[in-house]
Image (tube, helix red, strand yellow):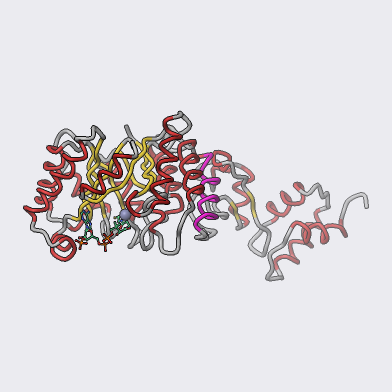
Amino acid sequence: MIGILDSTLREGEQTPGVLFSREQRVKIARLLSDANIAMIETGHPVVSDDILNSIKDIVELKNSGIIKSEIVAHSRAVNSDIDVAASLNVDRIAIFYGISDLHLRHKTHKSREEALNIIYNSIHYARSYGIKVRFTAEDASRTDINFLRDVIKTAISAGADRISIADTLGILTPEKTRYIFNNINDIKNAEYDFHGHNDLGMAVANSLTAFESGATIIHTTVNGLGERVGITPTQVLGTLLKYHYNLDVVNLGSLRTLSGIVEKYSNVKMPLNEPVTGDNAFIHKSGVHVNGIINNPETYEFMSPEIFGIKRNFTIDKYSGKHALIEKLNKLNLKIDDDGISYILNEIKNSNKIYSDNDIISMANHFLIGN
Ligand code: COA
Ligand code: ZN
């Protein structure tokens, strides 16, 4: 299976300043499932009762067939965390453990040998509940590759069927991402997830490379929310996989709604120029571009906005040409002669202003044919 694990509810709520209510979390889970997302990471239940209760609600919806996605709960490599996650009857427990020397030395104060034991024992313990386990190699991208291999083999031998390679600090490049996968792909009996942070703006590129290098589940959040500056945005990765590989990992028609709801619930405002779902994603400006769009939208649109449930548009200002102005007048049902068009275009060129439809209507009024 190739798919997205959407972690808006877990990683996304780790965005500074963001908290979802129980109802909002359930609503987001329903929308993600309706959008055909393969896996939903619902949260780390020991963090709070509120999160635990929302996971209960989501599992209930899964049991009644309303939610179809695989339900994942997060857990430290600690038995008491695992007990709580297991009690919720989720489909999968995702156990994470920081494995770089930095994390071992300064966070958990464990040797590599001790870490391997902790990883083995916690996965084995979770598997005794009969639940599927993903092991997340936290800070994998800063981990000695030979130790990463030992960790993966240990996790698989304890019963994990998925291993998440986490670029926890977002320091990878596509080339380095490919290097990691090329050095672990020979290990059998598990599939890989990739979890890419965006600290250096590389999350999307690294995630696509991870997919191209063998990862079968890519972690994303709606609007790219997450710890610090977040992770790969669901809308961008889903669209990329459709564009380049014709893969349907998310219903593209749901992305605008998902983005808008998560923007509202998180109160993290999306920039106009956010790829795919930003307000400007299918708005054109320059005369040459609008002329191309009028003749054939494929000249300046990578995919049709209708696929995303969005209407294309164009703006009128000094960057506009006559084709754009004529198209605008036609759309507004305003018929004026060539002199009128030249006059209006000249006015527009000699002002530094953005023209609304009403501005165009009032200018055109003087030149209407038949007036
Ligand atoms: N597995 C096992 N232990 C881990 C771990 C892991 N993956 N990661 C960190 N730890 C340990 C640390 O070494 C530290 O142990 P110590 O208390 O013996 O020093 C402890 O877990 C983390 O410290 P702290 O958060 O202060 O402990 P806490 O017991 O008060 O709270 C949580 C633990 C998980 C309930 C709390 O941190 C929380 O609500 N976190 C939000 C979720 C989160 O941090 N997610 C990270 C996802 S990458
Ligand atoms: Zn993360």
Front-most of residues 233 and 103: 103
Q: Quadrant of residue 360?
A: bottom right
Q: How many marks?
A: 0
Q: Position of residue 67 (x, y in %)?
A: 45, 34
Residue at 62% in and 43% down: 295
Q: Is residue 314 left or right of residue 146?
A: right
Q: Where does ligand 2 appear, by image quarter?
A: bottom left
Q: Is residue 55 left or right of residue 362?
A: left
Q: Position of residue 109 (x, y in %)?
A: 13, 62
Give the prevailing secondary structure in the magenta stretch: helix
The residue sitting at the top extreme is 65
Q: Position of residue 154 (x, y in %)?
A: 11, 42
Front-most of residues 85 and 197: 85
Residue at 16% in and 58% down: 100
Front-most of residues 276 and 15: 15
Q: Is residue 349 left or right of residue 364?
A: left
Q: Position of residue 200 (x, y in %)?
A: 33, 62
Residue at 41% in and 64% down: 16
Q: For the magenta stretch, what is the residue range?
A: 253-266
Vertical side of 130 occupied by 337: above or below: below
The residue sitting at the right extreme is 371
Task: Say which quadrant the N terminus sits in.
Answer: top left
Q: Would residue 8 be counted in the magenta stretch?
A: no
Q: Quadrant of residue 141?
A: bottom left
